Amino acid sequence: MSSPTSTLSAAPRSGPGATAAKKAKVRPGGRRRTNGAAYIMLSPWILGTVGVLLLPLLYSLYLSFTQYDLLSQPHWVGLQNYREMFTADPRFVHSVWVTVQYVIASAPLKLLMALGVALLLAKPRRGQGLYRALFYLPSLLGTSVAIAIVWQGTFDVNGPFNQFLNLFGIKGGAWVSDPSTVRWVIVGLAMWQFGAPMVIFLAGLKQIPRELYEAAEVDGAGTWRRFWSITLPALSPVILFNLVVEMIGAFQAFTPAQLVGDGQGGPVDSTLFYTLYLYQKAFTEQQMGYAAAMAWVLILGLSVLTGLLFWSSRFWVHYGD
Amino acid sequence: MKVPETTRLRGIRTGAVLAAAALALAACGNNGGGGASAAGGKITLRITWWGNPTRAKATQDAIALFQKAHPNISVQTQPGAYTGYYDKLNTQVTAGDAPDIFQVDTVAKYADKNALVDLSTQSPVLNTAKIDQSYLAQGSVNGKLYEVPAGSNLFALTFSGDLVAKAGLTSPTAGLSWQQYATLAKQISAKKLSAAGGGQVYGAADDSYNTQAFEIWARQQGGNLYSADGKSLGFSKQTLVDWWNYWAAMRADGAVPPATTTEPGVTGDVTKAPIAKGQVAMDLYGTSTTLPGTGWQYVGLPGESGHPGAYLKRSVNWGIYAKSKHPTEAAELIDFLVNSPEAGAAQGLTRGGPVNSDVLTALTPTLTGNDKAVATYGQYVAQAGNNSAPPPAAPAAQQQIETDLYVRMAENVWFGKSSVDAAAQSFMDQADKLLAQGS
């Protein structure tokens, strides 16, 4: 309790909060009373965070060192789950590989789509609000179960996509049942859900000072040159942000693998995404301890990758000023 | 946009009133339920199962009859789809809140975890006298009965008489050898009929992923899927290698469709199976499976002469949750569903043929179409010489071995990721490991 109190009272050094600090000094008893009220107001949030987030999080850390089948008590096994993962479980290694391939394919493609559409929509024109809404719409629908199922049907061997190819005399394959193509179907599903990064790119584009473009135009820079030398560098902080968010999101992809694949990671484990394997371990095989350990490896792995991205940003992200 | 103060206040007040009303309603609901159970002595049973809407409707009709006869028992039905059924059930069992009665087909898994009631303790209300011992043995662990079969699922050579006739060939009959089955399949494929859903019609479905079909093959050679104690496999690696080689040859000959056509059906959704989509004319299938459409015919499996592998195989079953507060009433309901001719008439063959011989006899004359064909085939299998002793109860790891590991290894062969020999070896090793763990 003591540390939040001190931060609360120490924080308002300047700005509008300063007066509050001054008042607190005048009435010594008042501070505690004010803080008490604050804690009461905060209690729903505190209870929620501690009860629903923090405690389960710590419990899952504990479970990751146990063997737990849900029906009997957890049984402490130390690091065995972690050891098994990296030394004795080829499916785990395979699921990491499948997921990394998916992330490398889907995150950049999605961002390219988002940036491309944002560039088109950034120019002021009549009804642009409508266009933006329309391009955002797929993101609202795309994560739904229904769309994933329709998407699977679309790429069925006798589905609309192959019928379309047939018009041009191309004989399409069994995209969804073929282990070599099913991942691309899932990447395709992710690609048109670019609404969120698109909106952020749009906001970023608006922040770029017009003078830069005007000056460049006077100097005779073409469209491509302006994009390459002004838009991209100016946008690079936004790109970093989107990249981090999309990477984390892609690593956690579950619904498309569950629904477009056969739900068990098949055919031949080609859709065995990390989270799908985790789910299987937890709820099909009831190895909750192992699944908890997998979740912690995912968190650690994502932290490291995010750290690496931030480290690399010094070479390619330009903050104005 | 600025909202006038009064309007905003009124909005808040309306919200508060609504919230209070909602709370009050919720409270009423609780009191209502609790009060009734205290006052009238009325108890509530929950029952869950998976299956198609026809099964759901038929079961609910039968349960309505039960409720009419037992006004003090109210039954909540919770039908669901097979996908995710066990995930949900496992979670409910963990939370100590599973339904009183659930449909189940893996006895050892729940019996080992003490999640099922020993049904012999309920024998005063749950009568099993009219059920063949073969069925009951499959639901017993260490001599204790944990599951009562809700129907039979006799494995059969299932075919569409229509498609075979269109191909201009004579329908298969009982007593085919595996070689003759392959030849007939090849002949049908050669006609290149076009399938309703697109593509061509193949002679037979590729059953190399199907453990139920493989079980027949193993039993014809004197084995079983599992050993009597459930601690190891009941067949040799060579048996599995021969089986997968048989199907590899079928694929090479074009007697069965390519793997990409078979793949969508491997997770157990019958509507996605090639036989259901009219992409194949023949398949090895359980009779309890509700294939869409009509005109299905059932005959004895290939390779049965001499040493039949078929047996009186149970379909899905009913079990009572160990923590049920009303095990006796739950047993009464199961007794009604399985033994009452009324309930039998209401349920029809939605879980396969009735296992109670009296109910089956009463029901048979009223059946038509597919149902009649299933019942006729049931009589055929029940004759001496057309079946053999049932296998021992399956071990707890059954589900993981049969629906996950086995299918994955078959797929590895299909898509050329490993040879038949390597896949079989890998299956044997991993299955042995799972059985040894006893999970």
Image (cartoon, grey):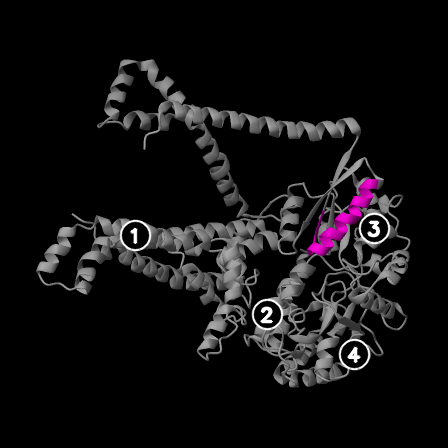
Helix, strand or loop for disc 2: helix
Quadrant the N terminus of chain B occupies: top left
Can residue A307 be seen in this snapshot? Answer: no
Which label sits on residue A128?
A: 1
Q: CA distance from mark 3 to mark 4?
A: 37 Å
Residue for badge 2: B263
Which label sits on residue B303?
A: 4
Q: CA distance from mark 4 to mark 2?
A: 26 Å
In the rendered image, the residue lying farthest to the front is A126
Nearer-the-camera pick, A107 or B49 = B49
Can residue A37 be seen in this snapshot? Answer: yes
Determine contact: label 3, label 1, CB under 8 Å. Answer: no
Residue for badge 3: B343
Q: Mark 1: which amino acid?
A: Gln
Disc nearest the viewer among 3 and 1 = 1
Neighbor class of circle 4 (other Cα within 10 Å; few <14, some 14-19, many 20+) is many
Q: Position of residue B113 (x, y in %)?
A: 71, 48
Disc nearest the viewer among 3 and 4 = 3
Disc nearest the viewer among 4 and 1 = 1
